Image (spheres, grey):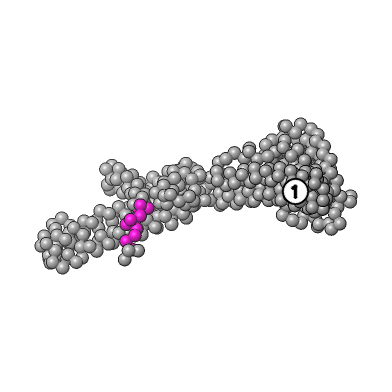
């Protein structure tokens, strides 16, 4: 019994009822204007729903009243971006109007019916209600009096659930919003793969080299390099988690090619002999291109340390002709990975493609080469 009465104690039941009552305000105002045409407000909702900003307002109302307190209720608060979104908003407004009318009618007439049944049980016959004014009074009508209230309870709870289901279907994220969310999750996954993967690779290489060297001074330098790389990885992790915690946080906090010296020094500390050359005005590279270029360079150096070890590495970064060029070459290891194998190499090509550029990875003239061309515009 307690389970069935639990909705009476939930605030959500009453906020949903308030949400269902809101459309009745428009209907009530119109009834003072012309009672002979009660369908006019529903007709007016069609052009209103085509306004992009209306979808935002409806999404905010649904979040506040249908599922208050939930972190991700599943309602979009973005304006209508296309025809499909506008049509879904129109349909939602019509559904909300119909459900609001049903709950409004129930909230008025079901309590009235309960009172009339109670009056019939006391011997009083109503003279202003059709059908009931011809009923013969009897005491057993007292047994029926609670039934309209139970029906009202079921209508309020049931329509509250129904309007929530309808809101999720019609105000939920559009296909474009779901795709954007998927791309964002993929971007975060790449960020974690690049930053944490690089740090772990450097730490493993440094620890292995220190153990093999058996030299206290070298071990001290290796531990210092591991500490610096770990601190940088923690900072990267904090940036990525910040994006997850705060979706509106600017991405300008992510590292750019201006901070590439730290990457090169980390690779050198791991034993790689890095020969780096930078040409062209690197400061003119736009932020998004510079940030993705940094990640491409980071992943390329990580792959060198992971698969080739302490080998000579040639890094070339150039800006000319409206393009950013990145090239990382190193001697092929004894076991040559196939071209394009591994999530890191796929990530390099994906990053370049997202910016309208291209990247290639694979053997070239006895070396392993990673090369990327990114347009600056």
Q: Residue placed farthest to the front in the image?
A: 216
Front residue of this view, candidates 66 and 217: 217
Q: Is residue 270 left or right of residue 195?
A: right
Q: Measuring from the top left, give residue 365's x and y in whole percent.
A: 89, 50
Q: Main secondary structure of the magenta part?
A: helix
- Residue 49 visible (yes or no): no
Q: Residue placed farthest to the bottom in the image?
A: 140
Front residue of this view, candidates 14 and 335: 335
Dot 1: what SS?
helix
Q: Which residues are magenta?
A: 4-13
Q: Measuring from the top left, give residue 312's x and y in whole percent.
A: 85, 46
Q: Quadrant of the C terminus?
A: top right
- Residue displayed at 56% across by 51% down: 178
The tally of labels here is: 1
Q: Is residue 201 left or right of residue 133?
A: right
Q: Measuring from the top left, give residue 129's x and y in whole percent.
A: 17, 57
Magenta residue check for 10 = yes
Q: Quadrant of the N terminus?
A: bottom left
Q: Quadrant of residue 266?
A: top right
Front residue of this view, candidates 232 and 297: 232
- Residue displayed at 74% across by 56% down: 342
- Residue displayed at 27% across by 54% down: 107
Q: Which residue is mark 1?
A: 202
Q: Quadrant of residue 248?
A: top right
Q: Measuring from the top left, give residue 114's x and y in whole percent.
A: 21, 59
Magenta residue check for 204 = no
- Residue 96 visible (yes or no): yes
Q: Is residue 235 left or right of residue 245?
A: right
Q: Residue placed farthest to the right in the image?
A: 365
Query: How many residues crowd around disc 1 within 10 Å: few (fewer than 14), some, or many (20 or more)?
Result: many
- Residue displayed at 50% across by 44% down: 78
């Amino acid at each position: 019994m307690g389970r069935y009465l639990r909705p009476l104690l939930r605030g959500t039941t009453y906020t949903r009822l308030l949400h269902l009552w809101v459309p009745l305000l428009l209907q009530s105002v119109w009834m003072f204007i012309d009672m002979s045409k009660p369908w006019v407000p529903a007709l007016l909702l069609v052009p209103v729903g085509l306004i992009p900003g209306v979808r935002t307002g409806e999404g905010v109302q649904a979040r506040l009243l249908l599922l208050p307190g939930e972190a991700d209720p599943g309602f979009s608060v973005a304006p209508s971006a296309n025809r499909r979104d506008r049509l879904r908003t129109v349909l939602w407004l019509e559904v909300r109007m119909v459900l609001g009318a049903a709950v409004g009618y129930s909230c008025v007439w079901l309590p009235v019916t309960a009172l009339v049944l109670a009056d019939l049980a006391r011997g009083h016959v109503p003279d202003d209600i059709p059908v009931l004014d011809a009923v013969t009074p009897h005491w057993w009508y007292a047994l029926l009096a609670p039934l309209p209230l139970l029906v009202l309870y079921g209508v309020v709870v049931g329509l509250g659930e129904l309007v929530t289901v309808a809101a999720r279907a019609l105000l939920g994220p559009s296909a474009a919003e779901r795709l954007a969310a998927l791309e964002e999750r993929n971007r975060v996954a790449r960020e974690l793969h690049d930053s944490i993967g690089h740090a772990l690779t450097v730490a493993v290489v440094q620890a292995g080299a220190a153990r093999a060297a058996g030299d206290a001074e070298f071990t001290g330098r290796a531990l210092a390099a591991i500490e610096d790389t770990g601190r940088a990885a923690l900072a990267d992790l904090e940036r990525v988690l910040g994006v997850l915690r705060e979706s509106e946080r600017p991405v300008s906090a992510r590292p750019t090619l201006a901070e590439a010296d730290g990457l090169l020094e980390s690779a050198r500390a791991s034993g790689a002999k890095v020969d780096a050359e930078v040409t062209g005005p690197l400061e003119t590279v736009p932020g998004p291109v510079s940030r993705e270029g940094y990640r491409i360079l980071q992943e390329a150096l990580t792959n060198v340390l992971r698969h080739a070890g302490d080998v000579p590495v040639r890094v070339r970064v150039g800006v000319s002709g409206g393009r950013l060029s990145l090239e990382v070459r190193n001697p092929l290891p004894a076991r040559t990975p196939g071209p394009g194998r591994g999530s890191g190499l796929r990530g390099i090509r994906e990053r370049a493609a997202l910016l309208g550029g291209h990247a290639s990875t694979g053997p070239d003239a006895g070396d392993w080469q990673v090369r990327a061309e990114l347009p600056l515009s």
